[in-house]
Image: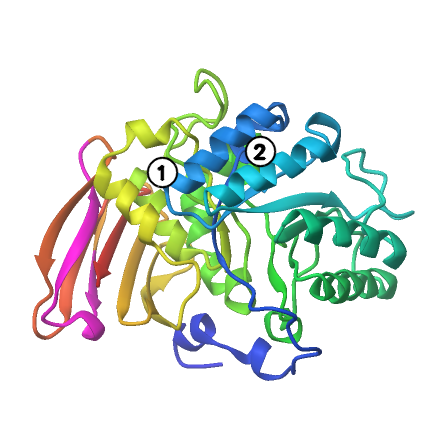
Amino acid sequence: MGKDLEPIVETTVSYDVVKPLYEPSEDYKMGRATWSWIVWQDNSINYEDQIKYIDMAAELNFEYVLIDNWWDARIGRDKMEELVQYAADKNVAVILWYNSNGWWNDAPQTPQDKMNTSIARKQEMAWLQKIGVKGIKVDFFGGDKQATMALYEGILSDANDYGIGVTFHGCTLPRGWERMFPNFVTSEAVLASENLVFSQNALDMHAYSATILPFTRNTVAAMDFAPVFLNDRLSRDQERGTIRSTTDTFELATSVLYQSPVQHFGLTPNNLNEQPEHVLDFIREVPATWDETQFVDGYPGKHVVLARRQGSNWYVVAVNGEKDAKEVSVNLPMLAGNSVQLLFDNANNKTQSKKVTVPENGKMTLSLKGQGGVVLIAR
């Protein structure tokens, strides 16, 4: 509660009212991940394409690669051991997808029936630990029944015994789980970026939705939306698929706007050759975890300006949820008098970079293109 939107965005109440349920078995590492499935879809779940995404993760200094459904059938467990080792040699860790299967779930994607009983889980997690897998993404949960809630807790508890971090998809809203379960990473629990690939309407509404989520879903828990698409069309060949209307800087801003301790990016290998170095450098350096969040300005459906800090570094992002350009006056006392990097949209909706000095009073005006964005970086 409050007189304005600030306490809603900045609240930590969902973590403050719970206590840890067990000790971590190791120091779980958060970070950023490449993910072939989000744009290249099911056909990318093969050994050769996963090598490309591991290489991209290494090039961008990402900590993880996520390998999605059907990997057991299309790559195989023996070849997966090779992939995990290849990734480890490049200082990239692997997250593997699993179906939550049980009687509640007839989704056909495999691996199936590896997470729904403790005996099966422990056998699978022992293998994961042996080959060096660091995380799992478990999908397709059935509601909030007591049995389902117990399943979440069982997966998390067993995974901690084997040093494995857990992400949930097709799942309920987490309620203080970041503190309750030390190996809980993040949850989807939102109409996430897969809908941008599946539906043109969802992609058309992305800028608008981006100004809603910081006030709603993402204020109460980590949100695995999986942001940052730099392809003009969200498909492998870019000759078909949904068409993006957001600007490149808007997309970069969502990596800060959407909070998830492991941030799965919607990038594709061609982006490495198409984007300028200042864009790739931003992606290489942007954090996935934060020490502080400050709401700066905005209103649901209009625009959002948010500041996040890791250590002594500040990232301030602004996104425009509307189609018309606008100027937003903001007060940034944390940047007052500092020289900062400004990422902004040019006439072609591509990202440019320049150095600017924030006035001593911290007040400045941000120019936002329609469905565009701005990023300020103070290191």
Which residue is under mark 2?
A: 37
Q: What residue type is labelled 1?
A: Thr
Q: Position of residue 336 (x, y in %)?
A: 14, 72
* Residue bounds of the magenta highlight: 328-347
The answer to whether residue 364 shows anywhere in this view is yes
Q: Nearer the viewer, mark 1 or mark 2?
A: 2
Q: Are marks 1 and 2 in contact (CB under 8 Å)?
A: no
Numbered disc 1: secondary structure: loop
Point out the tag, 1 or 2, that comes first from the N-terminus.
2
Is 24 drawn above or below residue 209 in the view shown?
below
Query: Within 10 Å of the Cα at label 1, are there few (<14), some (14-19), or many (20+) other Cα atoms?
Result: many
Numbered disc 2: secondary structure: helix
Query: Within 10 Å of the Cα at label 2, are there few (<14), some (14-19), or many (20+) other Cα atoms?
Result: some
Q: Is residue 331 magenta?
A: yes
Q: Does the magenta stretch include residue 336?
A: yes
Mark 1 → mark 2, Cα distance in angstroms: 21 Å
- 72 horizontally vs 46: left or right: right
Which residue is under mark 1?
A: 246
Is 3 drawn above or below residue 25 in the view shown?
below
Q: Position of residue 83 (x, y in %)?
A: 59, 36
Task: Give 291 or 321, whichever is nearer the viewer.
Answer: 291
Task: Give 38 or 371, whichever is nearer the viewer.
Answer: 38
